[in-house]
C-alpha cells in the first residue's frame, strides 16, 4: 500500500497566477502527503481554461509516479492500482472500472512488466490511468410552452457545443409529455430566453435536464387539470403517454394529445422550471463525482521514436445517462483530443521574439484518422449508477489519456519519457539518456 | 494577401515572356499548394502570377527509349498511380505517397514539389530565409528542432522541403528548364539545388524567368527505395527522408547513391554512405555501416541531435528495402 506521496511541481499561468494540480490525484486517502507548487510567471498570454483544468496534469504526474513505483517493485501495474484502490473515494466503482477496462483491452493476455522483452525495434506496451471529476449542474431556467394546436416549445438561454444538449432537452420534454421527439421544438441561445448557465465544468447537462424536466412536468400538470373534467376523473389520475392523455387506472378512457390541447382555447400554457443545484442534488435529480479508467496499447519504434496508438479503452461512469450515443460520442471525442495532446499538440514560442511559431495547422499538429488507432468506450450503467441522477460528462474522459499513453510508452520502452507530448525527438532523447531526467 | 495580376498564357514561350528577370516580381502558379500559402503569409508579394494551367504539354508520364519523361505539371496523384513508375521507380512513388494528403496530391505537381519554398517557421513568420532578427540568427539560437544537421556553419539553416528531390537525384534524373525565347537548358537533378548565399537568391539554380518543364529519369536498372520518418501517420512533413538507388549483380552493389532529405538546406548527397555500399554484399550489417557513414559530417543545432539516430534508421531501412526490391 502507498504510505506517502511527496510532490514538487513547477508550472506557469503565463503572466497570471498559478495553482498547482491536486496531487495525489484520485488516490486522495494516502495517509501522508506533501505538495509544493511553484508558479513561474512568463512573458506569455495568461492561462486559459482547457477541458478539465489542472486534472490532466495531476493525473499524468500521479499515475506516472504510481506506474513507476509498480515498475520499481517489479509488480504488474494493474495489480498495483487494484491493491491501492481503497485509497480512492470510490473504491468499488474504480475496481469495477479497472476490471472492465482490463477485459476490453485484453490486459491479461497482453501485459508484461516494464520493458517489452520481445526482440526487434518496435516495442509494445500497456498503460493505465484513473480520473475523477465533479459535474453536478449549473443554475438553469427553462420555459416549456404547450400551444392550443398541440405544438410544444422549450426555451432556455443555454447552448449546444455540439455535445447533444439539444437532443437531451428534446428527449426529456418529449418523454415527460408522452410525445414523439419531433413533436418538441427546442430553442436555445437567445438573451430573451430564461437564464441558463454557461457551459463549463461539465455542468450543462445537470442544469438543463432538471429545468426542462420541471418545466415540462408543470406544463403537463396544467394541461391535465384542463383535461380532467372532459375525461371525468381527477388530474392526479391522468397520464400522458404515446401521444394521448388517458386515465391511469382505465387506459381506455383517453383523448389524443391535439384534441386535449384544443381544450386550452386561445391561451397556451407556459411554465418555468428552475434548477437549484443544491435542492436537485438532495432530491437525487443530479449528483457530482464521477470516475473513469482508461487503458492504452501503444507501439514505439525505438529507432525512430515514433509512437503508434494501437488501441485505447475508456470506461466511464456519469450517473444516469440520458442518451447513450451522445454520451459515448463525448468520450470518443475526448480520446481523440487526449491522443492529440499526448502525442502531438504543442504551442512553440520563440524565446527571443516571443512569437508563436506554429500558429497554423501545419506544425500545430492534431491527430488524424490514421493516428488514433482503435477506440473502445464503455459507459457504466444500471444499479449503483442510474439512481444517482444526471452528472456531467464533458471533461472527465479527456483527463486520463496523457497518463495512460505515457504509462504505455514507459511499459513498452522500459523507461519513462518524462514529458508530453511524446514526440519522436523526446522519445529518442530519453532513450539516449537511458531514462534519466537530465 | 496583396492584389496581383493573374495570367494564364497558352504557350510556354508566352509564359516565360511574362516572367520578370528578378525574383519576387512574378511567381509561377502550378498546383498552388505552396504558392497560395506563401501569398497568404506575405512571404511573397508578386505583381503578377503566371499560371501554367493552360499548358497541357507540361503534363503526363511518357515511357521512352532509355527512360521515363515526367511533365512538370504532372500531379503527385498521377505520379503515385503510374504503373510504369511503380514498376521501375518505387522510390519516387513512395516519396509522392509520403505527402499523404489526397487533396494536396491531387493538385500538387512534380515541378511544384521541387520548387516549393522551405517550411522553416521563422521564414514563414516573416524573418526571411536566414531567420534573422537584426544580426541574430533566430534559427540558430531558438527553436531549431526541425532544422538542418548538415551544412550548419552557414547562414541557411532551413531544410529543403522537397519530397521527390532525393529520389530524382538518387536515380540520376535530369531536369529541363525553359527560358525566354524558347531557350532551354538541362540540369542534373543533383545540381539543381543550391544553398542561397544571400536573401536575394533562391534554393534552386532556376532563374526568375525560367520554367521547369520536365524531368527525365534514365532506366538504368537500379534497385531503389525511399524511407521517410514523420511524426503523424497522415499528412506531415518528414523529419528525415532517405532515397537510395544501386545496381546489384550477384548480390554485390554498385553505382550506389544515398540521398538524404530534410536534413540540409538542399537534398544531401551522403557520399560516404554510397561508397560503403559499392562493391559490397548487401546485408543487414552493410546497411548499418552505410547508415553510420551517412551521419558523417553531421553537425546538429541545439535541439536536433535526435535527427542523427533517426537518419541512421532511415538509411538502413531504405537500403534494405531497395535490396529487397
Image: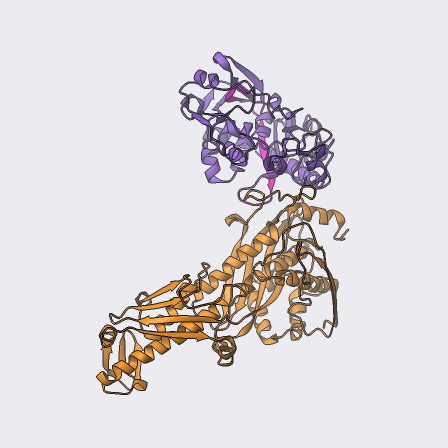
As drawn, the chain in purple is B
Q: Is residue A269 above or below residue A436?
A: below
**Residue pushed farthest front?**
A192
Q: Main secondary structure of the magenta part?
A: strand
Location of the C terminus of chain B (image quadrant): top right
Percent x, y of residue B308:
70, 38
Percent x, y of residue B203:
61, 26
Res. B143 image quadrant: top right
Left or right: residue B218 compared with residue A232: right
**For chain A, what colour was chosen?**
orange
Q: Is residue B202 above or below residue A50?
A: above
Residue drawn 70% across the image and 32% down it: B150
Q: How many marks?
A: 0
Camera-nearest residue between A398 and B81: A398
Percent x, y of residue A242:
29, 74
Left or right: residue A226 compared with residue A315: left
Res. B151 image quadrant: top right
Percent x, y of residue A13:
66, 56
Quick check: can you spot residue B26?
A: yes
Residue drawn 60% across the image and 49% down it: A344
Camera-nearest residue between A155 and B61: A155
Camera-nearest residue between A301 and A175: A175
Magenta stretch, residue numbers: B208-233
Camera-nearest residue between B92 and B317: B92
Residue drawn 64% across the image and 69% down it: A26
Quick check: can you spot residue B88?
A: no
Q: Is residue A137 in the magenta section?
A: no
Q: Is residue B65 above or below residue B122?
A: above
Amino acid at each position: 500500500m502507498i504510505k506517502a506521496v511527496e510532490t514538487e511541481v513547477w508550472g506557469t499561468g503565463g503572466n497570471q497566477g498559478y495553482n498547482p494540480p491536486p496531487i495525489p490525484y484520485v488516490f486522495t486517502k494516502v495517509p501522508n502527503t506533501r505538495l509544493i507548487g511553484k508558479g513561474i510567471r512568463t512573458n506569455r498570454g495568461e492561462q486559459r481554461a482547457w477541458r478539465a483544468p489542472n486534472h490532466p496534469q495531476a493525473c499524468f504526474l500521479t499515475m506516472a509516479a504510481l506506474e513507476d513505483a509498480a515498475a520499481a517493485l517489479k509488480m504488474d501495474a494493474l495489480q498495483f492500482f487494484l491493491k491501492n484502490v481503497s485509497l480512492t473515494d470510490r473504491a468499488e466503482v474504480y475496481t469495477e472500472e479497472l476490471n472492465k477496462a482490463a477485459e476490453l483491452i485484453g490486459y491479461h493476455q497482453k501485459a508484461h512488466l516494464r520493458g517489452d522483452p520481445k526482440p526487434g525495434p518496435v516495442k509494445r506496451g500497456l498503460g493505465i490511468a484513473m480520473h475523477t471529476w465533479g459535474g453536478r449542474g449549473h443554475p438553469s431556467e427553462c420555459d416549456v410552452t404547450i400551444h392550443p394546436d398541440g405544438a410544444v416549445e422549450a426555451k432556455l438561454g443555454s447552448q449546444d457545443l455540439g455535445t447533444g444538449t439539444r437532443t437531451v432537452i428534446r428527449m426529456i420534454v418529449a418523454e415527460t409529455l408522452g410525445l414523439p421527439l419531433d413533436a418538441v421544438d427546442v430553442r436555445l441561445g437567445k438573451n430573451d430566453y430564461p437564464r441558463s448557465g454557461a457551459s463549463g465544468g461539465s455542468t450543462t447537462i445537470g442544469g438543463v435536464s432538471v429545468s426542462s424536466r420541471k418545466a415540462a412536468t408543470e406544463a403537463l400538470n396544467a394541461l391535465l387539470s384542463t383535461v380532467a373534467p372532459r375525461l371525468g376523473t381527477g388530474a392526479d389520475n391522468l397520464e400522458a403517454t404515446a401521444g394521448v392523455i388517458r386515465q391511469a387506472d382505465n387506459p381506455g378512457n383517453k383523448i389524443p394529445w391535439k384534441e386535449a390541447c384544443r381544450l386550452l382555447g386561445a391561451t397556451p400554457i407556459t411554465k418555468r422550471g428552475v434548477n437549484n443545484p443544491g435542492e436537485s442534488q438532495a432530491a437525487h435529480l443530479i449528483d457530482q463525482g464521477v470516475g473513469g479508467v482508461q487503458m492504452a496499447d501503444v507501439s514505439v519504434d525505438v529507432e525512430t521514436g515514433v509512437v503508434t496508438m494501437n488501441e485505447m479503452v475508456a470506461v466511464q461512469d456519469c450517473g444516469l445517462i440520458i442518451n447513450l450515443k451522445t454520451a459515448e460520442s463525448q468520450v470518443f471525442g475526448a480520446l481523440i483530443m487526449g491522443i492529440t495532446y499526448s502525442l502531438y499538440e504543442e504551442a512553440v514560442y520563440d524565446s527571443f521574439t516571443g512569437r508563436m511559431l506554429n500558429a497554423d495547422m501545419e506544425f500545430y499538429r492534431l491527430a488524424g484518422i490514421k493516428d488514433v488507432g482503435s477506440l473502445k468506450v464503455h459507459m457504466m450503467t444500471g444499479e449503483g449508477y442510474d439512481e444517482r441522477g444526471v452528472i456531467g460528462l464533458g471533461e472527465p474522459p479527456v483527463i486520463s489519456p496523457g497518463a495512460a499513453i505515457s504509462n504505455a510508452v514507459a511499459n513498452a520502452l522500459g523507461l519513462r519519457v518524462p514529458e508530453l507530448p511524446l514526440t519522436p525527438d523526446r522519445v529518442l532523447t530519453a532513450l539516449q539518456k537511458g531514462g534519466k531526467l537530465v | 494577401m496583396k492584389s496581383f495580376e493573374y495570367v494564364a498564357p497558352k504557350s510556354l514561350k508566352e509564359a516565360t515572356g511574362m516572367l520578370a528577370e528578378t525574383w519576387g516580381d512574378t511567381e509561377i502558379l502550378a498546383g498552388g499548394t505552396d504558392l497560395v500559402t506563401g501569398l497568404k503569409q506575405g512571404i511573397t508579394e508578386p505583381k503578377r502570377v503566371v499560371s501554367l494551367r493552360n499548358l497541357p504539354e507540361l503534363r503526363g508520364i511518357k515511357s521512352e527509349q532509355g527512360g521515363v519523361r515526367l511533365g512538370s505539371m504532372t500531379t503527385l496523384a498521377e505520379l503515385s498511380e503510374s504503373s510504369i513508375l511503380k514498376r521501375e521507380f518505387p522510390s519516387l512513388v513512395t516519396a509522392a505517397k509520403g505527402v499523404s494528403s489526397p487533396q494536396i496530391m491531387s493538385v500538387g505537381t512534380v515541378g511544384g514539389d521541387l520548387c516549393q519554398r522551405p517550411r522553416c517557421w521563422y521564414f514563414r513568420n516573416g524573418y526571411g530565409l536566414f531567420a534573422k532578427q537584426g544580426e541574430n540568427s533566430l534559427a540558430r539560437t531558438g527553436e531549431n528542432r526541425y532544422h538542418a544537421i548538415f551544412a550548419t556553419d552557414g547562414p541557411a539553416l532551413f531544410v529543403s522541403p522537397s519530397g521527390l528531390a532525393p529520389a530524382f537525384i538518387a536515380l540520376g534524373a535530369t531536369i529541363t528548364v525553359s527560358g525566354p525565347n524558347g531557350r532551354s537548358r538541362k540540369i542534373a537533378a543533383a545540381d539543381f539545388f543550391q544553398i542561397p548565399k544571400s536573401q536575394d537568391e533562391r534554393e534552386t539554380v532556376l532563374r526568375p524567368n525560367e520554367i521547369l518543364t520536365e524531368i527525365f529519369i534514365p532506366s538504368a536498372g537500379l534497385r531503389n527505395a525511399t524511407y521517410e520518418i514523420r511524426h503523424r501517420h497522415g499528412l506531415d512533413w518528414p523529419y528525415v527522408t532517405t532515397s537510395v538507388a544501386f545496381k546489384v549483380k550477384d548480390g554485390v552493389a554498385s553505382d550506389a547513391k544515398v540521398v538524404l532529405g530534410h536534413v540540409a538546406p538542399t537534398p544531401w548527397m551522403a557520399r560516404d554512405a554510397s561508397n560503403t555500399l559499392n562493391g559490397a554484399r548487401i546485408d543487414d550489417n552493410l546497411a548499418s555501416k552505410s547508415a553510420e557513414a551517412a551521419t558523417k559530417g553531421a553537425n546538429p543545432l541545439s535541439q536536433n541531435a535526435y535527427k542523427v539516430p533517426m537518419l541512421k534508421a532511415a538509411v538502413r531501412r531504405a537500403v534494405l528495402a531497395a535490396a529487397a526490391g
